[in-house]
Image (cartoon, rainbow, N blue to C red):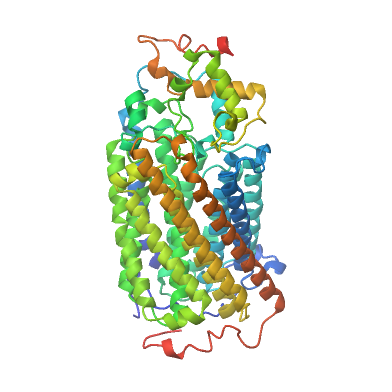
Amino acid sequence: MTNPSPLTTISVTPPETAAPALRSDDRLTFPKMIAIPALERRDYAMQTWLFSGVFWMVVAASIGVIEAVKLFYPEFLQGIPALAYGRLRPVHVNLGIFGFMSMGYLGAAFYMVPRLTQTALYSETLGVLTAWGWNLNLMGGVLAILMGLSKGKEYEELPFPFDMMVGILEILIAGNLFSTITVRKESRLYVSLWYILLAIIPFPIYYTLGNVMNFRGIEDAIVNWFYSHNLFGLWLTTLGLATLYYIVPKQLNKPLYSHAISFLGFWTLAAFYPWNGGHHVIWGPVPEWVMTASVTASIAMLIPTIATMVNFGGTAWGTQGVMKRDISYRFSIVAYLSYVGTSLWGSGLAIMDLNAKLHFTSTTIAHVHLGFVGFGLAGLAAFIYFYLERSLKRGYSRKLAEWHFWLTVGGTIGYVVSMGWLGWLEGSEWASGNSVQGVMALRYWYNVARAGSGGLLLIGQLLLVWNIWKTMTSGPSEGLVTGMASDESNTLKEGAAV
Amino acid sequence: MRFIREFPIIVALSFLFGLAFTGLVLAPVFASDISEPTPKLVAYTPTEQHGREIYIREGCVYCHSQQVRNVKADQNMVDAYGVSKSGDYFYDIPHLLGTSRQGPDLSNEGQVWGKASGDFAREYLIGHFKNPREYNPQSIMPSYSYLSDRELEELTDYVQSLGAWKIAPEATETTAEITPTEAQS
């Protein structure tokens, strides 16, 4: 592939891992002008993003547990306006989206882009400053919601000026990553870069559309969910998949099963995902064709889902040995399975008959948490352990990581099963004529189980934080504790290019 | 020029995104049933609008939908109040359709605990905001006793306006007759 056509330039394995040296290109004067020497450390931007993401994940999970307790013991922390359920819920969601998932996976993107392009990041300084700007802005926005200044629509609660600041910062982030990709030295674009391009480029359009103003009545609802679903589909999912596409072949030390399938998966995702927003108003007071288009697109999402399923499944086939010894890879598998599960579930919930029964029930909440925790959190954990061990060459505590893994898996299963099953029961009760008030007693123990599962997840994530902290402050280790990198010969196959 | 290599990808992605944008965002603007209010629908009075802002501020929408769908699960509400139509939301800026029913749907609460029931309904609603479990021990609704009396009044006005216009007398042109909020509060 000396001069391949641009639409097929995917290499099968991500290129070399070593981060290229900084400031290597003399043509770029702007990043030099704004460079702050103290921030111009290799991977400093990426670390700031990643660890900020971990911080917000713990905050979001803690708030989630408080909310969960309030759902079966409403007197818990009662009487404090800022801690009322209706104010904590948007904070939990916004921290989950803009704190944990956005920042964590942008950390992964800031890691992948220089390596996949063989080019130093356009500006480490800009990367670090945008990360801190994002942190402070999010903090301000969340405090504003707690003070009662929410804009009031799902996922666009952050009030002015915090909402617009997110958009401006995203443009700076996109500029930073995009410039790096544009001046890259490696001409081939690995599939992860495609997903990153899809994540960073349309964001300002739908973000502004969703946040800048209220439309009238149902139009407002349609725009709201157009924005919301693109935030999941084109921002979080793409960044998450980019990360999995990068780390899985490296963890296995073998090429991706098929780049033709990742090609298919990428373009079908880009074609169908933006249409999905309308499936939040199935059976609702919207024009019939909005529903039809969205239901069709949601079911068409089976194509990219199955493509990803086959591609990762084919890559992961027969790798039980790696799974056993490499916690990072095991997390990747959890993320992969959850991604497939969430996507199939999402398509299923868009089927008219199922939606009639399950919309408004706890099933939706289970679906979202399978996405955010099963896919988002496990994928990020996979990346973090991968980063500590393979890039920083530091051994983390294997024991803590095992606990983290099993608490996360246990918590996720507990959460998704309790809420999913409760949602089914609620849907059945309502379909047979029972009222919302009539299912309150039924909900009690499921809500307790949800809080318990959330508690397990939170404890697991605290172990992750502790593990990262100990690893980062202990300095590089001579021998890797987990023994992954030293035992890779059996998976090395023909065509593996590392 | 290396940029050229990404360029076709970006054009293709923009096209796909633009297609969905046109279909889901631009096209609905021209749908007539969205741009016209349902007959008899009335705009919110200033106090109702204030109440609506409190409803938004306290995040009521996360547990209460305002949308009756033509499905089996909503059959009782459909029979009693009819299916929600897009014109019903003409004055809802922002929308408060909701996605979850931790609590009951409120789109017709103004008929359940309406102004027609007089002081009794008002006292119930305010008392319920302050201490929901006094009325229903199984309720998990937060207590809103921290709201001021005035805020509770406004919130009550808003809740009593929901769907109340549907049972208003026919042939009304002005909003004043249907929503005598000032007179009551």
- Identify the residue at horizontal 51%, vertical 64% (top origin): A410
Q: Position of residue A18 (x, y in %)?
A: 55, 80
Q: Which of the pair A418/A387 is nearer the observer? A: A418
Question: Which quadrant holds residue A133?
Answer: bottom right
Q: Position of residue A30 (x, y in %)?
A: 60, 63
Q: Is residue A255 above or below residue A191?
A: below
Q: How many marks?
A: 0
Q: Position of residue B174 (x, y in %)?
A: 43, 10
Question: Which quadrant holds residue A490?
Answer: bottom left
Q: Quadrant of the N terminus of chain A?
A: bottom left
Q: Which of the pair A98/B118 is nearer the observer? A: B118
Q: Which of the pair A443/A144 is nearer the observer? A: A443
Left or right of residue B135: residue A288: left
Q: Is residue A387 above or below residue A225?
A: below
Left or right of residue B152: residue A8: left
- Identify the residue at horizontal 39%, vertical 77% (top origin): A316
- Identify the residue at horizontal 35%, vertical 24% (top origin): B80
Q: Is residue B116 above or below residue B126?
A: above
Residue A26 seen: no
Residue A444 seen: yes
Q: Which of the pair A448/A310 is nearer the observer? A: A448
Q: Position of residue A40 (x, y in %)?
A: 66, 70
- Identify the residue at horizontal 37%, vertical 45% (top origin): A358
